[in-house]
Amino acid sequence: MQLRPYQHQLITDIRLQYQLGKRTVLAVLPTGGGKTVCFSYIAQAAARKGNRVC
């Protein structure tokens, strides 16, 4: 999956917040910005690590 630079930045920002202990993060992109793509990427990476994804 090829991410656009702003999508990659969004994922990096979300991961940073999780590392800081936040468990609720609001991600905002405009319509067509690829929110589903970003969260699919995060879920896929978590599943590859053996984490439960629901």
Image (tube, grey):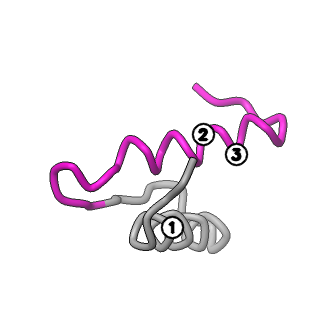
Indicate whether residue 42 is drawn in magenta. yes
Left or right for 49, reference 13: right
Instruction: Say if 33 sits above or below 46 in the image.
Output: below
Q: Which residue is mark 1?
A: 8
The numbered mark at residue 16 is none
Q: Which label's residue is closer to the chain start, 2 or 1?
A: 1
Label 3: state its secondary structure. Answer: helix
Q: Nearer the viewer, residue 34 or 20?
A: 34
Left or right for 39, reference 20: left
Q: Magenta part of the protein: which range?
A: 28-54
Task: Give the crowd class for mark 1: few <14, some 14-19, many >=20 residues within 10 Å.
Answer: some
Single out the residue that lies furthest toward the top: 54
Q: Nearer the viewer, residue 10 or 3?
A: 3
Residue shown at the point (49%, 59%) measured from the top left: 3
Task: Give the crowd class for mark 2: few <14, some 14-19, many >=20 residues within 10 Å.
Answer: some
Left or right for 32, reference 18: left
Label 2: state its secondary structure. Answer: helix
Looking at the picture, which amino acid does disc 1 mark? His
Q: Which residue is mark 2?
A: 43
Q: Quadrant of the C terminus?
A: top right
